[in-house]
Image (cartoon, rainbow, N blue to C red):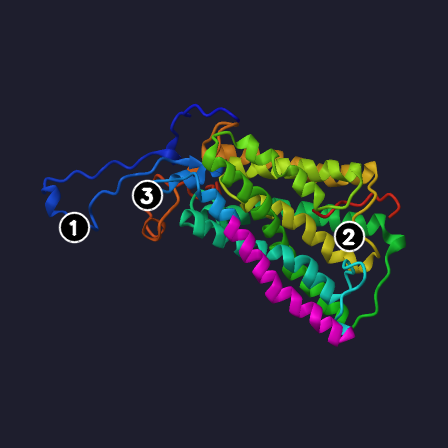
Amino acid sequence: MTSHHPLPQHPLDAVPAEPTSTAPVAARTPATAPVPATPSQPYHRAARAIPHRRYWWRPLVTIAVAGFVWIVMNLQVMVPLMILGELWPAAATSPSLMDPLNPADQVLGLGMLALLVPAVLVGSLAGYGRAGIVLSVLGRFRWGLLGRAALVVVPVYVLLNMVLNLILEREAIVVPEIGPAVILAWLVALVLAPLQCAGEEVAFRALPMQLLGTWLRWPIIGILVPVPLFMLGHGYNWVGQIDIALFAIVMGLLAWKTGGLEIPILLHTANNWTLFAISPLIPGFTEQGEVGLLGLVLALAPMLGLSAGIWWWYSRRAGLGLWEPQRGRVQTLSSASSSADPSAPADVPSPSAASTSRPLSV
């Protein structure tokens, strides 16, 4: 995985042959003139697929702009929310900031992380000239890939995180008094959870992998460096932190393997969304704290099992070796609209407080 030796070219990396023509080169119009191809790159080196005269300073600009934009957006969105809570107690946050029945808690806690998505995209646009490299080696989000994987991933998490937990925690279930605030808090969580997961993925997977990948060829460095920071953002004991660390490493590997964030965002969202969906029924369900061994097993089993299956499935569908990453060239608007560019990897083709045993939200 860490080797930087050139890999054998596969169909997805094939460079289209330059069209032959008997007409003089000078007579060709700009629309038909051949465009010099940039080399195909894996996800962590996606910035290198964009022609630039200088690369060394671009990661610094990217992270500086992303951080500045995130802070400004939080000041514009979150500060008014806190002021509103002071003026109108019904809209105030709870002391814990983690009450699943409080709309302000959900907006504040999930919204701050969701704002990482536009912040990192703007940072990448400023640093590299392309925001889309954050999403995939194609420069766009591959909805088809996410949709096919979701057909398996979502039912597994619904079964394990929702159905199984409602059975195991049946004695702790408390149906809250249904009111506008409860319904709003529940809806806010369900809407913002995917954005919160996407925000963590672009900040802890895409940003460090591509920043360090601009300078270094080895993807493992960009995968491992942000792991301690990701762990610090979660308040579990050492047992729970094992799951958080392994989750971060596996999601980084999947981003490298598949050439984008679609699968990590899917797995992250499927886990958190199903937990948030039933959290109003079980007090303290999503609070971070002590975790038991059973909780660790329930959290790791679906994540590791599905990740291994997707790794094998994607390798076969994309015609890749088991330890070969997806490569691609970041598409421009013209190349994205053209179906005649075999150099760009398409979506994977379809063949036809007390110790808890609950899964962990990441």
Q: Which of 51/21 is in front?
A: 51
Residue 216, image x, y percentages: 48, 31
Residue 151 shows in the view: no
Is residue 300 placed above or below 84 in the rendered structure?
above
Q: Mark 2 sits on what residue?
A: 286
Per the image, is 87 magenta? Answer: yes
Distance, label 1 to label 2, CA atoms, is 61 Å
Start and end of the magenta stretch? 64-89
Residue, far bottom: 87
Q: Earlier in the sequence, mark 3 or mark 1?
A: 1
Per the image, is 82 magenta? Answer: yes
SS type, badge 1:
loop
Q: Mark 3 sits on what residue?
A: 341
Residue 255, image x, y percentages: 54, 39
Mark 3 or 1, closer to the camera: 1
SS type, badge 2:
loop
Is residue 51 left or right of 25 when viewed as pictured? right
Is residue 150 left or right of 274 when viewed as pictured? left
Residue shown at 60%/39% (left/top)? 251
Dot 2 alpha-carbon crowd within 10 angstroms: few under 14, some 14 to 19, many 20 or more: many
Q: Which of 347/90 is in front?
A: 90
The reply to whether discs 1 and 2 touch (Cβ–Cβ < 8 Å) is: no
Q: Amino acid at mark 2?
A: Thr
Q: Amino acid at mark 3?
A: Asp
Q: Amino acid at mark 1?
A: Thr
Residue 289, image x, y percentages: 81, 46
Residue shown at 37%/42% (left/top)? 50
Q: Which of 340/232 is in front?
A: 232
Distance, label 3 to label 2, CA atoms, is 46 Å
Q: Earlier in the sequence, mark 3 or mark 2?
A: 2
What predominant SS class does the magenta segment belong to? Answer: helix
